[in-house]
Image (spheres, rainbow, N blue to C red):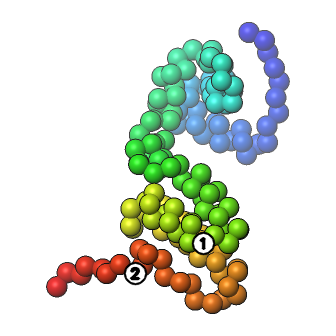
Amino acid sequence: MVKSTVRFPESVVGEIETLVEEDRFESKSEFYRFSTDYVLNQVLDDYEPETIDYAEIKSEVMPEAERELRSDADTDHPPFLESVSFVRRLALRGKFNDAEDFIDHQYAAGDRHAILLEELLRLYRGDVTADAPAEPSERDRQPVERDR
């Protein structure tokens, strides 16, 4: 292996040493090798990690369940950041009704992503209407069933 010297701030080295002390990594060298392989694997399509036991280390340090807990992997709607971009683009063009329709058709009522997208849309609408009350969306006009 080729040796390379890299300098890190003391705070970074301290955090790495803590991970080693907690037995998340066997050594600082293992951390550096794994980290480098991980980043290269994420950035380059054809990169194969060379760290010994890379898959095992990855599964221990970054369990799949935790990584996917907040993802859109098991939802029926588009990825959230793509939806944010699309709603923002419509709002900037003044197409608020189209943005509402998109949210209503892509997300279930009460979905946390829908709520955030509606808030984003409300903020953009507020910029255009200069503090005028926002027109209620189709979702807001629907009667709410209440427990009696």
* 98 relative position to 127: left or right: left
Which amino acid type is shown beneath numbered disc 1? Phe
Choose the circle earlier in sequence order: 2 or 1.
Answer: 1
Quadrant where the image shows the N terminus? top right
Which residue does the numbered mark 2 point to in the structure image? 141
Residue at position x 68%, y 61% in the image: 89
Residue at position x 73%, y 46% in the image: 11
Residue at position x 68%, y 72% in the image: 94
Residue 115 location (% of width, % of height): 48, 68
Residue 87 location (% of width, % of height): 60, 62
* 103 relative position to 81: left or right: left
Which amino acid type is shown beneath numbered disc 2? Arg
Q: Pointer 2: residues within 10 angstroms few (<14), some, or many (20+)?
A: few
Residue 96's tag is 1
Residue 123's tag is none
Vertical comparison of 77 with 45: above or below: below
